Amino acid sequence: MLNNELPAILGGKPIFNSFVPIIEPTLPTIEEIKLKIQDILKTRMITNHKYVQNLEKSLKEYFGVKNVIGISNCTTGLLLLGKCLNFQGEVITPSFSFSATSLALAWLNVKPIFVDIDIKKFTIDPDKITEKITSKTSAILATHIFGNPCKIKELSEIAEDYKLKLIFDSAHGAGSIYRGKKISNFGDGESFSMSPTKVLTAGEGGLITTNNDLLAEQVRIGRNYANPGDYNTSFIGFSGRMAEFSAILALKSLEHLDENVTNRQELVKVYKKILSELPGLSFQQIEADSRSSYKDFAIVINDKEFEITRDVLYEALNAENIMTRKYFSPAIHQQDAFRLYLKGQDLDLENTENLAQKILCLPIYSHMKSSKVEKICDAIKRIYLHRSELR
Ligand SMILES: *Cc1c(COP(=O)(O)O)cnc(C)c1O
């Protein structure tokens, strides 16, 4: 039986003959997009035109939000939102996120103020925010980690009470639902990514969503050098448009978004059912009335109980030809580029640092079969059974 064989890291044969990537973009066939590609080649309208407009319209319906603006990527979207909402001084944000969340703040010349996360949900902990608010605070930028909606109600209340802007890094949020409402409808605005690793993909691309018409108008102008139409640049914008080719990919990806997110729920169920049999492994908590897109599926390894550290499990799975990722390790405040922002900050980020040390994201993608998940779990079991030889 499989489980009696030696793990590859101890000299056994790898469970997979070829490498299993942590994520694969789900893409259309050439037949599915051929006519549209021919259309843009024929009309020579290759950026920010018909298909971007179609995508914006389709997404408005899908999300149930008043405005969707197609842009070149999510980082651009965060910059545009921050610029148009006049971010200044300090902005409250999680350190447990992808670097781009804070990179955007740095480009806006504001100081990221790092707040710890809820250890079960992995998203920013609203209870730890108010103590960080000063006279310099202008906004909150929160991330729906791996697609798990933030504690949005609590965040919105704080933003309202302290008159702060609230935006979301919703790079992982397409297909996520918070208490019956699609992610895209919250805060002053949200910014989505459609890069290749995201559930809704355009190759490269992003989206801003907002129910504020005035803000929508500003970001529409901002993505186009802030040229309102007469070349009299109205503020410091930049080039942030979406290409038509990207919009064609995204339109196809959108057609399958709900079906893909549903498949991911099934894959996660299989992962959780099998891995729950092992001691010391736990999972991100999603509220019962919300839905995660499961852009990523993470396990948290308590090495006292599992008796294997995260880093050893990472190496052992790599030897089995299974690619995993230590998202988000190092956390943002632990990265070199952000060192200069740490001065004067209380870095009470215990949950963030703990999670960054224990987390491992396993392969998940929309067209993945549950048999592959089962095989990955077999690999983890096999490694676990030989844990005493691994140390
Ligand atoms: C991928 C990602 C981004 C960056 O998205 P781009 O579209 O590449 O700019 C930002 N934030 C998070 C949390 C991400 O995962």
Image (cartoon, rainbow, N blue to C red):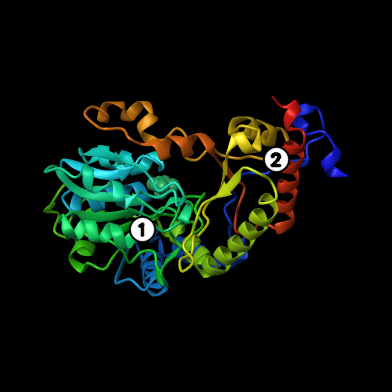
Residue 156 drawn at (x, y percent): 26, 60
The answer to which of 357 and 198 lies nearer the viewer is 357
Above or below residue 154? Residue 5 is above
Please provide percent x and percent y for residue 46.
Answer: 40, 58
Tell me if 359 is positioned left or right of 213 in this view.
right
Residue at image position (71%, 46%) is 376
Q: Which mark is residue 19?
A: 2
Q: Residues within 10 Å of mark 2 (few under 14, many from 20)?
A: some
Check disc 1 and report the residue beneath it: 151
Question: Residue 378 vs residue 110: left or right?
Answer: right
On screen, 14 above or below 293? above
Q: How many marks?
A: 2
Q: Nearer the viewer, residue 105 or 165?
A: 165
Question: In the image, is the residue at mark 2 within 8 Å of ligand 1 by its beta carbon?
Answer: no
Residue 168 lies, with reference to residue 349, above or below; the image says below
View extreme (front): residue: 305
What amino acid is found at the position of numbered circle 2 in the picture? Phe
- Label 2 secondary element: loop
Could you say which quadrant of the image residue 154 lies in? Answer: bottom left
Answer with left or right where residue 156 lies relative to residue 247: left
Q: Considering only order in the chain, which callout, 1 or 2, is on the residue closer to the N terminus?
A: 2
Instruction: From the top left corner, tell me how far across and down residue 272 is, in percent.
Output: 64, 55
Q: Describe the element under mark 1 as helix, strand or loop.
A: loop
Q: Quadrant of the N terminus?
A: top right
Could you give the CA–CA distance between mark 2 and mark 1, rounded to whole angstroms?
37 Å
- Amino acid type at image mark 1: Lys
Residue 132 visible in the displayed image: yes
Q: Nearer the viewer, residue 188 or 224?
A: 188
The x and y percentages for residue 343 are 23, 27
> Any mark on residue 353, and which?
none
Proximity of marks 2 and 1: CB atoms separated by less than 8 Å: no
